Image (cartoon, rainbow, N blue to C red):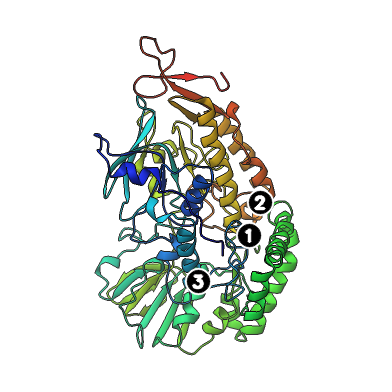
Amino acid sequence: MAEREREPEPEQGRRARGPQGPQGPHVRVAVVGSGFGGLGAAVRLRREGITDFVVLERAGSVGGTWRDNDYPGCACDVPSHLYSFSFAPNYEWPRAFSGQEHIRAYLEHVTDVFGLRPHIRFDSEVMRMAWDGERLCWEIETGSGRLSADVVVSATGPLSDPKIPTEAELPGLDSFPGKVFHSARWDHGYDLRGKRVAMIGTGASAAQIVPAIQPEVGRLTLFQRTPPWVLPRVDRGIGGVERWLHRQLPFTAQARRGLLWGIRELQVQAFTKRPKALGVVEQLAKRNLARTVKDPDLRARLTPDYRIGCKRILLSNTYYPALTRPNVDVVASGLAKVDGSTLVATDGSAAEVDAIVFGTGFHVTDMPIADRVVGADGRTLAEAWADGGMRSLRGASAAGFPNWMTIIGPNTGLGNSSMILMIESQLNYMADFVRQLDVLGGRVALDARPTAVAAWNQRIQERMERTVWNTGGCTSWYLDANGRNTTVWPGTTTEFRGATRRVDLSEYAVLRAARPGTENEETPGKGDTAKVEAGA
């Protein structure tokens, strides 16, 4: 990995120990979350010479989704050498596709190497953040106190808050006498050995959990609303000689990363412009199913009826074999209700279970943080997005929320490559955003113009019409409640990097604090600010 950086003590650390105003300490930048996005933002800020920032983390350690998801079998479905920061290569990955424990260890190491711990405020869940139009800053309430910041970088991520059915959605759930938990909140204190376990869902988590727990449970019942397409996972251990070569000749690791990236860039056309080209991949998936599942009835239940790629393609060598074991039942129907210890599917199938494991995904298109962000007009981000779904400018800025940016925002997700590539592109945009504020000088803020946000999102949705995610005949977590794809980027990572290389000030309104004794021509938010045309 990268060598440890030696930098002076962060300014925010010294300031936070000094006298506090009514809003608590003030920092230049507040970063929310300490997963890949938050830690990447922190590293980039330090490299830009900005040490006056804080990272607000609701838990007691870094890692984000790779801290929270520690279920049996948890691993990444993106090759390790591509699923890491370009500025912090790891030559010690033990496998081509590394497990959760190795990815979390990598993030801990990045935290230490780049001297980020003095910036991090643990156990500081953001409860509310509101734009102060007079001070041109964000007032932030956290579980550990208050503070204010000129700029907020929200890096909470789309896979941070589990989606668990409510009693209204799943009648009888509250009266279930057994154990219930989500895959992202695994209860390691509960012994599954010999138990009758229900796995709800067939996404990426379930494909890893099922083969991991199948050998030890008494009976495993998989409730499958929609079968996934599954391809073999070309995984292998990375030997000592190979790791030594990468350490001694770093360009070999760079070449490996470049090859992995290039292959995935070439695949994008099939997902975004020519979904029929995925038919070849679909045939490979069908052969994989036929080779591993000999029972024609089970094979029929596991065969999807939509175009491959419409939902995320799963990579596994163990999922199908686990489903053929004598102690596993596949119910080709979603869960409808709970009656005591009996789970009843929509097709009437029933199973007696001792524990329910939900692999039902996350709040992706309705990010909970949006309810806690209050913009210039007093509306929350969730309210601003209520009509038309999530939308932002270049996946980062939302109109009416000055100096607020998100990492992995709307339409920045990927269906076939590494999100770290998208994160690093957004870090470029974030860095230039802060530079532009410095160039403009004084008390100033940038607010994305509604017309710019609308134009950007119109282009996104027009491109989305041809993609496999919109035409493949499935319902996926990429789509919001209105069927609008607000999640995935309909292009290559190269295109996105070009689109986020720098901030275009013509897409923003510049907010300046009014000079004493002058009248405001326009008041974008509360208090004493004036809106100035970009570039003025």
Q: Which amino acid does label 2 sit on?
A: Thr
Q: Which amino acid does label 3 sit on?
A: His
Number of numbered discs on residues: 3
The tag on residue 417 is 1
* Residue at (39% x, 43% y) in the render: 11
Q: Is residue 73 left or right of residue 14?
A: right
**Are the two marked residues, 1 and 3, in contact with CB atoms closer than 8 angstroms?**
no
The tag on residue 74 is none
Task: Name the residue that disc number 2 marks.
Answer: 493
**Are the two marked residues, 2 and 1, in contact with CB atoms closer than 8 angstroms?**
yes
Label 3 packing within 10 angstroms: few (<14), some (14-19), many (20+): some
Q: In this view, does 72 lie above or below 459?
A: below
Q: In this view, does 309 lie to the left or right of 336?
A: right
Q: How far apart are marks 2 and 3 (CA)?
A: 25 Å
* Residue at (54% x, 28% y) in the render: 439
Mark 1 element type: loop
Question: Which of the two labelled residues, at mark 2 and mark 1, occupies the earlier sequence position?
Answer: 1
Q: How far apart are marks 2 and 1 (CA)?
A: 9 Å
The tag on residue 102 is 3
Mark 3 element type: helix
